[in-house]
Amino acid sequence: MTSRRIAIVGAGQSGLLLGLGLRANGYDVTIVADKRAEEVRSGPLLSSQLVFGPAIALERQLGVHFWPGDVAAVTEISFTAAVAPGAPEPAIAWSAGLAAPAQGVDQRLKVAAWMTEYTRRGGEIRYQKATLDDIEGFAREFDLVVVAAGRGPQFERLFPRDDALSPYRQAQRFVAALQMRVPDDDPIPASLRFSQSPAGEVGIIPALTVEGRALGMGLFAVPGGPMDVWDGVSDTEQHFELVRKLLRDQFPWRAEIIERAEPLSSLRGRITPTVRHPVGTLPSGAKVLALGDTAVTNDPLAGQGANLAAYAARSYASVILEQGDRAFDEGFMRASFARFWTVGRYATRFSNDLLAPPAAHMPALFQTAQVVPEVARRFVGVFENPATYTEWATDGTAAMRYLEEARARARG
Ligand SMILES: Cc1cc2nc3c(=O)[nH]c(=O)nc-3n(C[C@H](O)[C@H](O)[C@H](O)COP(=O)(O)OP(=O)(O)OC[C@H]3O[C@@H](n4cnc5c(N)ncnc54)[C@H](O)[C@@H]3O)c2cc1C
């Protein structure tokens, strides 16, 4: 048991997992939430989140993995790529299994259930949309203030962009997430079906949403390309019709799955990938620490955000525990982010690289994956464990050498 008091601003993926982790270790935790659980549950779509094995393992460890059999587990990634926009067939197609099942549970369900569970376990929630002044107040009242208020410019003066770690000044995709109901007799394959073309990408997963079993789809349009045609789309019906058209035009081999679907909810926008200086200085001089998207916002294309938020929550919880009764000072905050960044930087690089025009060795990597299962498995492994995104995938010379060795192994 400890007498240390910790405030977390934001009851989302990272804030709640950190709060639950600290409660489990006897900390006195206060989460500041701008919405009640029921408002979140009945509110707008938040993400299309697919969560991989390591994040699910954390949920299990904290006793908040509440949906184990309620949605088909995603056990593999099925990858297709077209070389030109509008190609009728993919030039590359392969599938590879994940090391552990992934799952697509609507974040609205998760956040609402976790808020309730956190309160049941003795955690306090204060309902308010925290301002900078409020955060000043928390810094006086608590031993540590963690800001986990999601992406966006809200606290950008407190946590300025880190130019050295943020290669993009603008959003690199228009992001369009959609959830659909499919007839009960339509099978939803247990895979993340990920397709790319020079026009953009689409990812399709089985999902559990507030309306029940569903199909989740994220569509990512390259700015100025043939899929970047979202001006004037303002509701889910229009969104659904446009997705149908874009799938038929750009990914016809993926279009059939939604022919019998009905739209449920949608979300559209552009996200500028940004890494921020994670230690904020308040006007009083007090320091606060950023967590999750507030510290590192990636484009959702690589599906890393919620996974990284879970990882960050676990990492911060362990550093807080190790700190014992010592002060949560600036040095502690810098060390907390540095520990998280040992993994976070790989997820961030992977996310940013997927947004860029493919490096010269990537076509060879994807072609080899088609005939050498080891290569496909290794690439799929990056989604669940981004720290494996190293030279074999990022450096042209190392990648070509690895592919040659993998081909030789496959030949026996
Ligand atoms: C379209 C889309 C698809 C995505 N798909 C995936 C995916 O497949 N896989 C994946 O891993 N990630 C995905 N993500 C990313 C993922 O949703 C985020 O990275 C993740 O939710 C970040 O968690 P967080 O705790 O930092 O922020 P959030 O989950 O956004 O939580 C922040 C919370 O803080 C609250 N808040 C904000 N301001 C205040 C304030 N001033 N006072 C009090 N409370 C406040 C917000 O209401 C919210 O509840 C996707 C995102 C989008 C937009």
Image: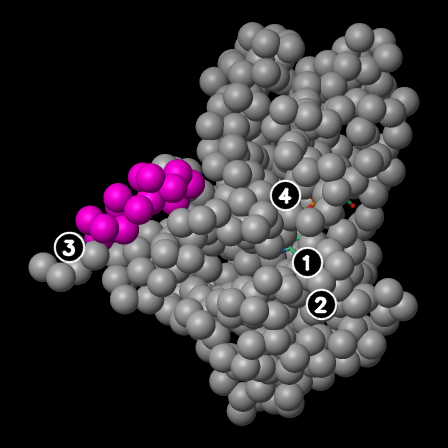
Q: Nearer the viewer, residue 28 or 389?
A: 389
Mark positioned earlier in the residue sequence (2 or 1): 1
* CA distance for labels 2 and 4: 21 Å
- Determine the main secondary structure of the stretch shown in magenta: helix
In this picture, which residue range is highlighted in magenta? 393-406
Say few, some or many: other residues with alpha carbon within 10 Å of mark 4 (under 14 / 14 to 19 / 20 or more). many
* Pointer 4 residue Cβ closer than 8 Å to ligand 1: yes
Label 1's element? Answer: loop
- In the displayed structure image, the side of residue 133 where residue 250 appears, left or right: left
Estimate the x, y position of residue 223 in percent, counting from the top left: 73, 56
Residue at label 2?
Answer: 227
Mark positioned earlier in the residue sequence (2 or 3): 2
Count of number-bearing discs: 4
Mark positioned earlier in the residue sequence (2 or 4): 2
Residue at label 3?
Answer: 409
Label 4's element? Answer: loop
Q: Are marks 2 and 1 in contact (CB under 8 Å)?
A: yes
Image quadrant occupied by the C terminus: bottom left
Residue at label 4?
Answer: 298
Residue at label 1?
Answer: 222
In the rendered image, the vertical position of residue 305 relative to residue 193, given as above or below: above
Three-letter code, disc 3: Arg
Kindly report which numbered mark, 3 or 4, lies closer to the viewer in this rendering: 3
Q: Which mark is residue 392?
A: none
* CA distance for labels 1 and 3: 37 Å
* CA distance for labels 3 and 4: 35 Å
Three-letter code, disc 2: Met
Q: Are marks 2 and 3 in contact (CB under 8 Å)?
A: no
At 51% from the left and 67% from the top, the residue drawn is 83
Three-letter code, disc 4: Asn
